[in-house]
Amino acid sequence: MSQELPQEFVQLNSQVSSLIVRLSPAPEIVYWGKAIPTLTSEAEFAAIIDRAISQARLDVDVPVTLCPEIGRGSFGSSGLEGHHQGKNWAPVFQYISHTLTGECLTIECADKLAKLSVKIDLILDGQSGVLSKSIRLTNHHEVDFQLDKLAFTIPIPYRAKEVMSFSGRWSREFQSQRHNIEHGVFTQENRRGRTSHEYFPGCIVGNKAFTHQTGEVWGFHLGWSGNHHWRAEAKSDGRRFVQAGELLMPGEVSLKQGESYTSPTLYASYSDSGLNGLRQANHNYVRQNILVLEQDKPRPVHLNTWEGIYFEHDPDYICQMASEAAQMGVERFIIDDGWFKGRNNDKAALGDWALDKTKYPKGLNPVIEHINKLDMEFGIWVEPEMVNPDSDLYRKYPEWVLSTPGYPLTTGRNQLVLNLQISECFDYLYRCLDELLSLHNIAYVKWDMNRELLQPSHEEKAGIRGQTLAFYRLVDKLRVAHPEVEIESCSSGGGRMDYEVLKRTHRFWSSDCNDALERQTIQQNMSLFFPPEVLGCHIGPARSHTTRRQHSINFRGVTALFGHMGVELDPVKENAQQRRAFAKYIELHKQHRTLLHRGHSFVIDSCETTRNTYGTYDDTQLLLAICQKAMPDYSLPEPVLLDMLDENASYHVFLLELPEHGEGIMKHYPNWIEQLRSNQEVKVHGSLLKQVGLSLPIQDPETCLLVHFVKCE
Ligand code: DGJ
C-alpha cells in the first residue's frame, strides 16, 4: 500500500501541542496531542501511521476525516447530512487545495458530482494550544441543498476512554459526570433554543481516571448559543472521535445555488497535566482571543438588587441601598427586574421598555446621579427577547411572537419569545435599548433570557438558527453604538454560557443559586472552560433564597472571592456587623483581584471528596482556598502539595481566613497556624510545600480556609 500513500501532511505546532493533518484524499487529523518536533520525513511518518485493512470489511482504508462521509464508507456518524431533493445524499469530498497562513490552515474540498464544496479552517493558537475550527459548506448545484447536519469530527486516541460531560438545570448548572466510551456512543443533544442549563455544548475526554492534576485530556467546546449536538464515539474498529455541531431542525437550512452555511466554531484544547492544564489553556485562550474586556480595567465589584428588593423599586430606598453599598466597597450598582412600566411581578410588562413613572416619578437619572456621585457605575437589567401577553407590545403586535401559526402559544415564566428575525421587531428592540443607553449614564446591562423556545418558526420554517443569529446581531449593533457599555449574559443564571456569546459580552451570571455549597461545584466546573473574571459570583444573604440553606459569611465570602465578585442582597436590611463582613470580603477581593483575574487557576487532587482545594498563582504568589463541603471522611486532612511553587524559593505564609470551629473535631491547630496566630512570621521553602505539603487544620463542614504564599525576595 505504501506507494499509494498521499505525500501531503501539514503540521501545526503550539507550545503544548502539535497537530498533523493528512490533506488527501480528504482532510484527516492524524495526530493531535503533546508537542512533537516538526516532521522532517513525510514518508517516514506516512509509513508508521498507515493503517492495516481488516478482513470482512471494505477493501480500502477509510479515514475518520474532519467531515466523515458515509459515501466513503465511514459508517459512524456522518459529518454532513443533506440532499438535493433526495439526490446527492452521500457525497464524497476530495481535497482540492490548501493554504497555510501563520497559525491558520485552510483546506478546500469538493464533490464535483454533487456540486458541493467545503472549506475547513483550522487555527492552532501558538500560546494556549487551543485549536479552533469551523467548516463552510457551499451548494453549487442549481437545486437547493437541504442541509440536515454539518458537524466537525476530531479523532481522539484509543486511550481516551473516558468522557466527562456537563449537565444541569436552573440553579444547578454545570454538574459533571463520567462515562466510559466503548463500542458505541455517548451523546448530548440540546433543542431548547439557547445554550441551555441542561447540556453544556462541550465535553472532556481523557485516559482512564484522569484527574485535575494528572492524565492526558482533550477538551471540546462548541461556541454557539442555540441548539447543538455532540457525541463521543468508539467505532467498531476501536477508533474514537468527538463530533459536534449545530443541531438543525427539519427544513431549517436550505442552500440555494451559491449559498453557504458555516458551522459554529469548535474549540479544542489538549493537556498532558490533567484538567488543570486544560483549564489554564482555555483561560489563556479566552483572555487573548475571545474577551472584549478592557484588559487593564479591574472588574468592578457589583451589587445587584434582585434578591434584595425583587420587583419593589422605590428610588429613595434604592439610593439608600446604594449609599450602604458604596460604604461596603461596591463599585457597580445594578438595578434588576422591576424598573419598567407595569412590571410589579413576573406576569406582565416584558416588551414595554419604558420607565415606570409611578415608581420613578423623577426619572432614572436622579438615582444614577446619586450612584455616580458615590463613585459607582450604574447598571440595569433588561430581557429584550421576551414579551408578556399582558403588555402593550403584545397587544399591538401579537404577530411578532416567535411561534408556528395555528399551534398554541405556550408561555414560560408567563412570557413568550419575540421573533427577532422580523425586522420591525428587531428595530423596535434596538430603538428601545439604544434610547435607554443614550439617555442615561449606563455602564452595564444585565441581559437576561428566561425561557426556552417552543415552536420557534420564522415564516413557518424552523427559526432557531435565525433567532440565534438575530440575537447576536442585536447585541453587536448595540455594542457598535455603545462600545463603552458592558453586557452580562444571563439566562436564568447560566443558561447562555458559551464562547460565541462571550465574544460580545463581558460576564456571565453563573447561576441564580447563591448558595455557596452549590456554587462550589458549579463554579469549579465552569472554570474548566471560562476564566474567573467572567464568572459572576455573588455573596448572598445568610439564608440562600434558592435552597434555604444557611451559611456563614466565611463560606459565602471565600466562595464568591474566586470570580467576578458581587453581592446580591439588601444592604440596608443587613446589620452593621454583617455589612462590615461584606466589606471585608470585598476588600480582600480587591487586594487580590489582579491575581484572581489573571493568574493560573488550579484544583488540587485529594482523596477527600468532601473538600475542594483550589486556587490561583503567578510567578510570585499563590492564593489557596480549602473549602470543606461536608463532614470529612477521614479524621486528619491530607497535606496539600503545591507543585506549582518554585522549588528554589522560600515563601512567606499568610493566613487570610481561618474559619471558626467548635470544640467538636479539633484540639490543636498545625504549628504554622499556631505561629501565625501568635504573630510569628512563617516562612517555608517551596520544595517542602511541593513535596511534603502543608498540614491542614480540621475544618467544620461548610467552612473555608484561605492562605496566601508570597515568594521571598
Ligand atoms: C433571572 C435572573 O437570573 C435573575 O438574576 C434575575 O435577574 C431575574 N431573572 C429577574 O427577573
Image (cartoon, rainbow, N blue to C red):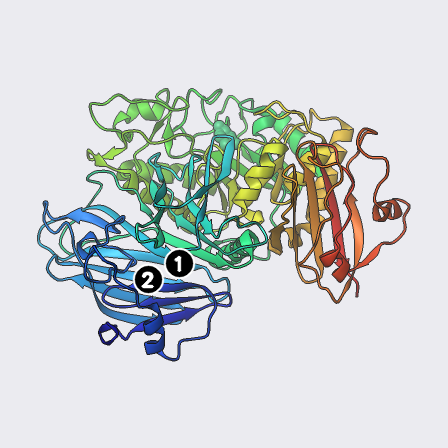
Identify the residue at horizontal 34%, vertical 63% (top origin). Answer: 29
Estimate the x, y position of residue 552 in percent, counting from the top left: 72, 30
Q: Residues within 10 Å of mark 1 (few under 14, many from 20)?
A: many
The image quadrant of residue 98 is: bottom left
- Picture quadrant of residue 555: top right
Q: Does dot 1 land on a helix, a strand or a loop?
A: strand
Q: Position of residue 606 (x, y in %)?
A: 65, 45
Left or right of residue 496: residue 107: left
Eyeballing the image, is 451 above or below 17?
A: above
Q: Residue at x 28, y 66 (%)?
A: 107
Residue 467 screen position, x and y as percent: 31, 39
Q: Position of residue 386 (x, y in %)?
A: 38, 30
Q: Quadrant of the N terminus?
A: bottom left
| Residue 525 appears in the rendering | yes
Under tag 2, what secondary structure? strand
Residue 121 image label: 2
Q: Is residue 327 visible?
A: no
Image disc number at residue 132: 1
Q: How crowded is the residue under tag 2: few (<14 C-alpha within 10 Å), some, or many (20+)?
A: some
Q: Is residue 552 left or right of 439 when viewed as pictured?
A: right
Image quadrant occupied by the C terminus: bottom right
What residue type is disc 1 on?
Ser
- Pick whichever, 52 or 149, lies toward us: 52
The residue nearer to you, when weighing 60 against 167, is 60
Q: Nearer the viewer, residue 601 or 437?
A: 601
Q: Residue furthest bottom?
A: 40
Q: Nearer the viewer, residue 524 or 421?
A: 524
Residue 578 in the image: above or below residue 262: above
The residue under label 2 is which amino acid type?
Asp
Q: Does 115 sit above or below residue 677?
A: below
Q: Earlier in the sequence, mark 1 or mark 2?
A: 2
